[in-house]
Image: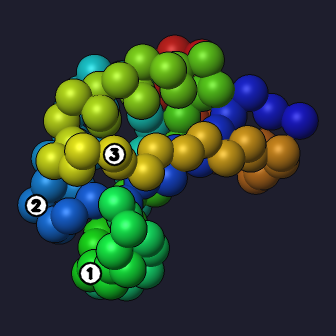
Amino acid sequence: MTDFVLLYSTIATDAEARSIARVLLQEKLIACATVIPSVTSLYEWKGDMKQEDEVLLLCKTAGHLFETAHKRITDLHSYECPCILALPIAAGNEPYLTWLSTQVNA
């Protein structure tokens, strides 16, 4: 088991996702971000069925930084109720996890 998490969030646009990722990187809240363009989300919101084109933002970070990263994403995000999830990283390539640890001072 590791103390690392994969932070998962859907964002309205590529520019917004990159902007959020840059802030999180500059503030050392994440080690790395992957922006995946053009995903489609289907969901119900306030009684209406929605289908939206979105961008997926995946960030790797230490588990203890999730709450701070969550707050920063919420502050920067354009959605009223953004999807922000922490998925535990159970195991990984040890050299990569060591690098991840040094990037976020874990």
Nearer the observer, 98 or 3: 3
Query: What residue sits 38% from the left and 68% below the top?
Result: 47
The residue mark sitting in front, 1 or 3, is 3
- Disc 3 from disc 2: Cα separation: 19 Å
Asked if marks 2 and 1 touch (Cβ < 8 Å), the reply is no
Mark 3 secondary-structure assignment:
loop
- Label 2 vs label 1, nearer the camera: 1
Q: Position of residue 42 (x, y in %)?
A: 43, 80
Q: CA distance from mark 2 to mark 1?
A: 14 Å
Seen in the picture, residue 51 relative to 54 is either above or below; the reply is: below
The image quadrant of residue 28 is top left
Which amino acid type is shown beneath numbered disc 3? Cys
Q: Point out which mark residue 15 bears.
A: 2
Instruction: Single out the mark in the foreground, 3 or 2.
Output: 3
Residue 12 on image: x %, y %: 20, 64
CA neighbours of label 1 inside 10 A, class few (<14), some (14 to 19), many (20+):
some
Label 1 sits on residue? 53
How far across and down, in percent of the image, does residue 6 sit? 59, 47
As drawn, the label of residue 3 is none
Q: Quadrant of residue 40?
A: bottom left
Q: Are marks 3 and 2 in contact (CB under 8 Å)?
A: no
Q: Residue at the left extreme?
A: 15
Q: Is residue 90 visible?
A: yes
Left or right of 13 on screen, residue 96: right
Instruction: Examine the rendered structure and indicate whether residue 93 appears above or below residue 38.
Output: above
Q: CA distance from mark 1 to mark 3?
A: 16 Å
- Return the mark for residue 81: 3
Instruction: Say which amino acid is labelled 2.
Output: Ala
